[in-house]
Image (spheres, rainbow, N blue to C red):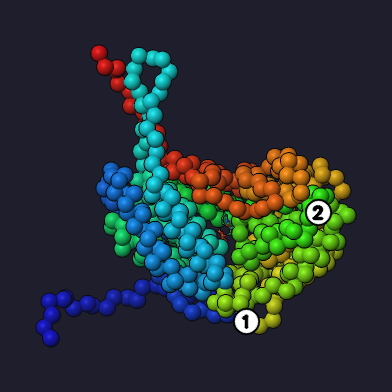
Amino acid sequence: MPTTEPERVPGPAAARFPVVDPATGEAFDEAPDQQPDELDTVIDRAQRAWSGWRTDPAARTTALRTAADAVEAAGEDLARSLTREQGKPLAESYAEVARTAARLRYFADLAPRTRPIDDGRPVRSEIRWRSLGPVAAIVPWNFPLQLAAARFAPALAAGNTVVLKPSPFTPLATRMLGSVLTAVLPEDVLTVVTGREPLGARLVSHPGIRHVTFTGSVSTGRAVARAAAASLARVTLELGGNDAAVLLDDVDVEGIADRLFWAAFRNCGQVCMAVKRLYVPARLHADVVETLAQRARTVAVGPGLDPTTELGPVNNAPQLARVEDLTRQALADGARAAAGGHRLDGPGYFFAPTVLVDVPPDSPVVTREQFGPVLPVLPYRSLDEAVEAANGTGFGLGGSVWGTDLDRAEAVAERLDCGTAWVNHHAELSLAQPFAGVKDSGVGVAGGPWGLYGNLQPFVLHRPPEA
Ligand code: NAD
């Protein structure tokens, strides 16, 4: 059949890298290994798209609402892709997709407020808000979709364009999300790039990027801040955590056990705001340990696609090695595993849910971020000692206090050095709240209106008053 299509001459095969299913440890697909020199074109297009996107807030609201609908419509495919490459149980992937859509919808309806400056001077001056330009959004592998939305939704709502780079451990669901969104957004307003380092390093140091919005580890966050300094781009960094939970002596151990267990072990402990250290009054220690260990021993560990699974694998081989090393070192230093303490036999990156006791307080599993299914439970004798230990690391993301007397628990929570503290909960977050770590856990504020303003700059207009 005659055709007007030009003949396609096959070029060199584009580079690709393997994507591993953590439930098997085997590669099951590939993603484009984009090279840093491709970024010039991508960012140039993002810059050009900005000129249209920035000017029409009403069109942005409509587009972002449509984007939220499109994410929900693709929910099944997105969730399956996410579980396959990330490992989490399918029900949690559905929840992650739902939160991704909710975040888009929340920011679609948020607009900055123009305000007069009323200082009594005879001028009319007004604070308005302007977008920044192309934004680089970089995210880790633990919640690829919802953390991506946490970065790009406020940036887009503010009128910026976004170049989004997922972790090379979880590129596929994000690429699918990118296809879903680019089908309904104006061209080049959002671009997903995938590839291995130095793609991220080059993206954050590119002179065309005006804001780097990053979620990841403290060490990479420092490298990102250094790289962005070259172009003086704004940085927002949401970094690691080592959240402490402090149980008070009036706590109802059995009543909180499930909530506390999942605050530590959800997503296989790979949550920035997971409970990563637990401080317990000495006289309750044995009871709390046995209660948590019993759950750790009986929770259903398996592939995320199996509907009976409650806890999936660790996401990747280096992370599994890290969890294993920290656990082995603690055991060598005198700790004892009340549950778990080892990898599970068979294929995949499975680690037995682990509760550690007799852990030296300076053991790296306590002082660093284990980011895996391992919880050290430490006894304390005085509340001051517990608060001091809880505040005694360089991290300051979240923390929690658990007890029956809520006023007393709140007073202790007030003393925690962190961005968010909970009573009888942990890591319950609202889209409308500011999200910010203190100390090494972050720079800048995301979440709620603060997330929107973090993607804007003030513009002040002065003029004489009407005659
Ligand atoms: P990571 O820092 O290794 O990687 C994060 C992202 O940065 C990835 O996309 C990675 O490819 C990219 N990257 C690596 N080197 C880079 C460079 N030089 N320049 C630019 N980008 C680069 O973190 P991870 O192991 O993927 O994720 C786990 C960490 O993320 C944990 O520390 C966890 O606490 C943290 N985290 C923080 C939050 C938060 O909101 N505070 C949320 C989730 C995870």
- Please tell me in which quarter of the rendered image ligand 1 is found: bottom right
Where does residue 192 sit, x and y in percent of width and height?
39, 61
Q: Which mark is drawn over residue 432?
A: none
Q: Quadrant of the N terminus?
A: bottom left
Q: Residues within 10 Å of mark 1 (few under 14, many from 20)?
A: few
The structure residue drawn at horizontal position 61% and vertical position 65%, both measured from the top left corner, is 267
Where does residue 11 sit, x and y in percent of width and height?
29, 75
In the picture of the structure, the residue carrying the numbered disc 2 is 280
Above or below: residue 389 compared with residue 193 = above
Residue 380 appears in the figure: yes
Looking at the rendered image, the disc whose residue lies closer to the viewer, 2 or 1, is 2
As rendered, which of 15 and 54 lies closer to the eye? Answer: 54
Where does residue 195 sit, x and y in percent of width and height?
44, 65
Q: Residues within 10 Å of mark 2 (few under 14, many from 20)?
A: many
Q: Quadrant of the C terminus?
A: top left
Q: In which quadrant of the rendered view does residue 179 lie?
A: bottom left
Q: Tag 1: residue type?
A: Pro
As rendered, which of 207 and 364 lies closer to the eye? Answer: 364
In the picture of the structure, the residue carrying the numbered disc 1 is 347
Disc 2 under 8 Å from ligand 1? The reply is: no
Q: Is residue 255 shown left or right of residue 398?
A: right
